[in-house]
Amino acid sequence: MAKKRPNVVPIVEDARQPLKYRMLVPMVDVIFSDVAQPDQARIVAMNANMFLKNNGWFIISIKASCVDSTAAPEAVFAAEIDKLRKEKCRPKEQLTLEPYHRDHAVVIGTFRPPAKKAE
């Protein structure tokens, strides 16, 4: 896909160490993450802080069993969303990938959205 779209840059590097590729990646509008790691919400938040523009979008694919195989998937999804909220990420939508992938969800949201104006 990146060969046909010049605005898509795949990063083949350890996402837990964004300092290794900081010189290669500018500020971006969207981050897509499908890392299947126990700390994937932290990984997204760390990369968003470094590379995502204010009011930019993130898309994270959460595999519940990679985060906590002993907890119910719904509890894992809720915990990951809470972690994202604490890091200035504002989830807008959550979709399960049933029946295609069991215990998977995709969360879409914005990073550092503008403050709501008091009316």
Image: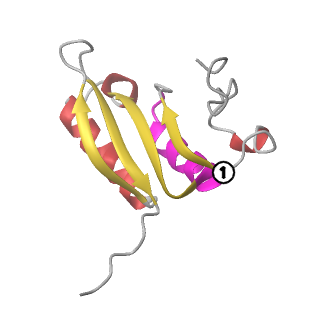
Q: Residue furthest bottom?
A: 119
Residue 13 sits above or below residue 82 on the image: above
Q: Quadrant of residue 102?
A: top left
Provide residue 99's location: percent of width, then percent of height. Answer: 18, 13
Instruction: Say which quarter of the image contains residue 23.
Output: top right
Residue 41 among those drawn in magenta: yes
Q: From this viewpoint, which residue is outermost toward the right?
A: 23
The amino acid at mark 1 is Met
Instruction: Tell me the SS state at disc 1.
Output: loop
Looking at the rendered image, the quarter that the C terminus falls into is bottom left
Q: Residues within 10 Å of mark 1 (few under 14, many from 20)?
A: some
- The one nearer the camera, 27 or 22, is 27
Give how far across and how far down residue 79 sits, in percent.
30, 45
- Residue 15: x %, y % from top left: 62, 34
26 lies left or right of 100: right
> To which residue does mark 1 refer?
27
* Number of callouts: 1
**Considering only vertical position in the picture, is 85 above or below 105?**
below
**Picture residue at 72% right of the left edge, 41% below the top:** 25
Q: Percent from the top left, x then y, of residue 87?
A: 46, 58
Read off the magenta span: 37-52
Q: Is residue 85 magenta?
A: no
- Find residue 107 and report its image quarter: top left
Frontmost residue, 90 versus 77: 90
Question: With 67 as the anchor, is 44 left or right in this view?
Answer: right
Image side of residue 41 versus residue 46, left or right? left
What predominant SS class does the magenta segment belong to? Answer: helix
